[in-house]
């Protein structure tokens, strides 16, 4: 039996890298007494794979790991056993049976991710202009201060004003047909249009909500989106200015017809259809990875 484990990563555990998280679960599974399958050969290891490694310094409510079980175990029992032997900061929140075929591996299914981005205390932008973006620059008004007015230049806007202006800036930002940004690769840096990879972007209380392309086909980091947004106003964010939390990971199961064919019995939540507006692809249907499995009773 194949199972999908959903867990959160919060607090000081955000500084633990992906390989250490993998080693942590290897030990936790042994201590919890879960009968996991091993590879064959001279150096057997647990059969497990992760959906999408989380960057160091980011927190998450929805990380996924696929494992193979030799002996089935009820979901509630597995969750309790893993959390009982676990550490503060990593909490198992779901344990689901998934189809056996290779097409249902979490690491190949990931197509999108939700994030919330906040500014760390003391790292908020001092001010944001209230006028619309014009090309790659923004017309500034008196919130940015007048030249030669020292008291105005030193004045900081209140957090309420900053978030009010940021909400307006996000709306104008997403209204652009193209959003060029410099995206770094392993070997070089090139300018790309990130607009098709932004599926949704809006302000929520004290944060910016982002739904972005993620996975092997297209991948967009929330830091790049925020840096590009602020850069339109001539603002350069300080290093480590953002607090980023990953809220969910999604699979793209295609059309509604494909969804009805692929959805197993006991599906947890319905898929969410994303239209062509702001997505660059009509008929996209995103569903949480947990919804592609069912609880083990």
Image (tube, grey):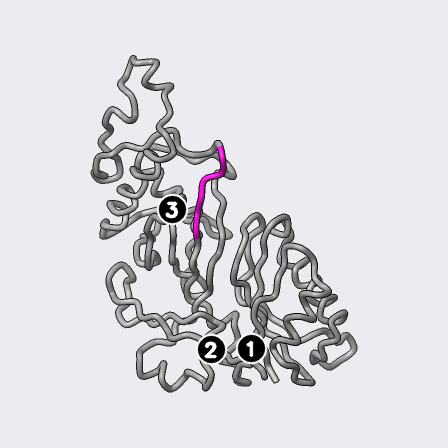
User: Magenta stretch mostly in which secondary structure?
Assistant: strand
Residue range highlighted in magenta: 116-121
- Percent x, y of residue 183: 41, 49
Q: Residue at x 30, y 14 (%)?
A: 149
Check residue 120 for magenta coloring: yes
User: Which of the 4 image quadrants contains residue 219?
Assistant: bottom left
On screen, residue 279 above or below 162: below
Q: Which residue is identified by label 3?
A: 205
- The N terminus: image quadrant: bottom right
Distance of mark 3 from mark 1, alpha carbons? 32 Å
- Percent x, y of residue 67: 62, 75
Q: Residue at x 37, y 70 (%)?
A: 286
Position of 53 compared to 141: left or right? Answer: right
Q: Which residue is identified by label 1?
A: 96
- Work out whether mark 3 precedes mark 1 in sequence or the reverse, and give the earlier one: 1
> 120 or 139, which lies in front?
120
> 280 or 259, which lies in front?
259
Q: Residue at x 26, y 69 (%)?
A: 282
Distance of mark 2 from mark 3, alpha carbons? 30 Å
Q: Nearer the viewer, mark 2 or mark 3?
A: 3
Q: Do the residues under discs 2 and 1 have CB atoms within 8 angstroms?
A: yes
- In the rendering, which numbered label is found on residue 292? 2
- The C terminus: image quadrant: bottom right
User: Which of the 4 image quadrants contains residue 156?
Assistant: top left
Callout 1: SS: strand
On screen, residue 99 above or below 90: below
Callout 2: SS: helix
The answer, for residue 30, to whether it is visible in the render is: yes
Distance of mark 2 from mark 1, alpha carbons? 9 Å
On screen, residue 34 above or below 141: below
The answer, for residue 38, to whether it is visible in the render is: no
């Amino acid at each position: 039996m194949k199972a999908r484990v959903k867990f959160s990563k919060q607090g000081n555990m955000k500084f633990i890298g992906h390989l250490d998280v993998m080693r942590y679960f290897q030990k936790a599974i042994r201590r919890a007494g879960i009968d996991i399958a091993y590879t064959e050969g001279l150096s057997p290891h647990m059969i497990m794979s992760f959906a999408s490694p989380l960057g160091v310094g980011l927190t998450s409510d929805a990380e996924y790991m696929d494992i193979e079980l030799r002996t089935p175990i009820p979901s509630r029992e597995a969750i309790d056993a893993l959390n009982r032997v676990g550490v503060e900061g990593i909490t198992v929140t779901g344990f689901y049976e998934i189809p056996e075929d290779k097409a249902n591996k979490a690491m190949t299914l990931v197509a999108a991710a939700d994030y919330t981005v906040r500014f760390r205390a003391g790292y908020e932008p001092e001010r944001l202009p209230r006028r619309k973006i014009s090309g790659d620059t923004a017309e500034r008004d008196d919130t940015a201060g007048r030249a030669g007015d020292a008291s105005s230049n030193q004045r900081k806007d209140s957090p309420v004003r900053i978030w009010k202006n940021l909400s307006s800036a996000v709306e104008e930002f997403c209204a652009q047909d193209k959003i060029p940004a410099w995206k770094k690769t392993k070997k070089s840096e090139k300018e790309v249009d990130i607009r098709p990879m932004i599926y949704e972007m809006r302000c929520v209380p004290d944060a910016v909500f982002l739904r972005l392309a993620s996975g092997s086909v297209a991948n967009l980091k929330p830091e790049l989106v925020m840096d590009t947004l602020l850069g339109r106003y001539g603002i350069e964010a300080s290093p480590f200015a953002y607090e980023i939390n990953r809220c969910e990971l999604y699979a793209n199961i295609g059309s509604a017809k494909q969804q009805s064919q692929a959805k197993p019995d006991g599906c947890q939540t319905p898929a969410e259809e994303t239209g062509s507006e702001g997505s660059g692809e009509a008929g996209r249907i995103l569903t949480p990875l947990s919804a592609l499995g069912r609880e083990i009773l």
